[in-house]
Image (cartoon, rainbow, N blue to C red):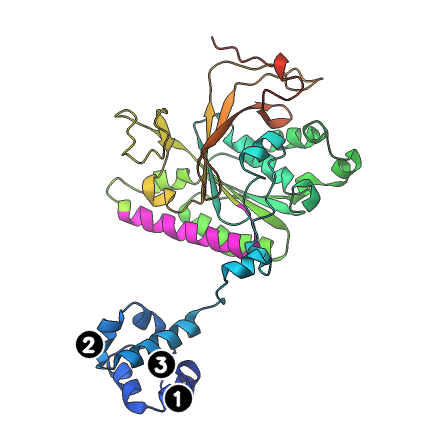
Amino acid sequence: VPGIFSRHYKARRAVLGKDYCNRNVPFLRVQYANLRSARDILSLSGPDIQRLTHLSKSDVQHLHKAVAVSYRRLSPVTALQVHRGECPSLDPGHKLSLACPVLDSLLRGGVPLAGITELAGESSAGKTQLGLQLCLSVQYPLEYGGLNSGAVYICTEDSFPIKRLRQLISQQPRLRSELPPALIRRIRFSDNVYIEHAADLGALQACISQRVPILLSRGLVRLVVLDSVTALFRSEFQADEGMERARQMSALAATLHRLSHNYSAPVLCINQVTDVMDGPDPANCNFGLVDNKVRPALGMAWANQVMVRLMLLRLPGYMGPRSQGSSSSSAPRRLEVVFAPHLPRASCLCGVWEEGVRGLTSTEPGDQEIKVLVP
């Protein structure tokens, strides 16, 4: 924090404390060691500060504590406070529904409100379909699995699929048949989806650091969808620029995490995949996907920034209509939980129909009529 060790003695007393600053000799030793900011002090260990300033161990501990308190923006939260419900922003109870009981069951309620959720898969696997479905689900009231707010959809490669969004809106009564029809008719879905296009990393950073916070602070949106996170990093960096690419990914993820935690807004990042050229190798960071020939793109540098990783795989064959009155068929998909702090490794069969993405179970009524036909 610039100015912590300014020339004004009054400011020094306010930061380090009256009792400490009254002992002028230790304080002057800190100043003469050219430690003039909180970053300078917190980046050094206690023995290093002792070596530079010749202070005692107790003085260094007091200095570290005072600077840390002044630098900390939020007070620490104990596990007991979270258990008692005293910190609603950290309460994991409510999640954003995927508008399907089977998919919600796989994720134990839906998408978490804090952190980055990644959805990876090959082209035409249905990643964008699920992102659009979440943009509509977030607009429902809390009691129906939504957040009673809108969504911002950031496109980095293709144009926004507006025709498909309109189709999903028209099919909401079929997808959410358990909800009151009057409620669905009352929501103006298309008015609450904000679309952004980012052609390069600079435009993307400007979008998520300037325009998206305004929408979140005004309560206009509670969901951020980035489609896709891969395109810009693949096009703007060469093979020998791995360090800079990792730094940019870390900065992007830090901004998204901050927005998610500050506004309790889930962030969905759609990711592409890369081929596994040397065959499945458990020691090659496949995260358990040893039976797949692809893995999520961007490597470990991005994987370390993600809280929940989901994989959507397209399977061979096709499935018939999912509901009465529908003539559309779908290729079978498998939605898999690759890793998450609160979920086990699991998966479920699903498909993309005219009304949206639905999960399948063998116990649902009418499922015996749905057959997967593999050529």
Asked whether the residues under the numbered discs 1 and 2 touch, taking CB atoms below 8 Å apart as contact, a structural biologist would say no
Distance CA(mark 1)–CA(mark 2): 23 Å
Relative placement, left or right, of 304 versus 219 is left
Mark 2 residue type: Arg
Q: Amino acid at mark 1?
A: Asp
Tell me the tag on residue 5.
Answer: 3
Vertical placement of residue 39 versus 159, above or below: below
Q: Which mark lies nearer to you, 3 or 1?
A: 1
User: Is 47 placed above or below 311 here?
Assistant: below
In the picture, measured across the screen, residue 286 lies left or right of residue 10, that is left
Above or below 253: residue 60: below
Q: Which residues are magenta?
A: 243-266
Image position, residue 74 (x, y; %): 49, 66
Distance of label 3 from label 1 (alpha carbons): 16 Å
Which image quarter: residue 237? top left
- Residue located 62% across and 17% down the image: 367
Asked if the residue at tag 1 contacts the one at tag 3, i.e. Cβ–Cβ closer than 8 Å, the answer is: no
Which residue does the image show at 56% across and 38% down from the upper left? Answer: 108
Percent across and percent down for residue 119 are 47, 36
Is the C-beta separation of discs 3 and 2 under 8 Å? no
Position of 210 with respect to 177 (left or right) is left
Q: Which circle marks residue 19 in the picture? A: 1
**Residue 344 as seen in the image, left or right of residue 168:** left
- As helix, strand or loop, the secondary structure at mark 3 comes to loop
Q: Write the residue at 50% across / 62% down.
A: 78
How far apart marks 3 and 2 lie (CA) works out to: 19 Å
Magenta segment includes 260: yes
Q: Which residue position holds label 2?
A: 51
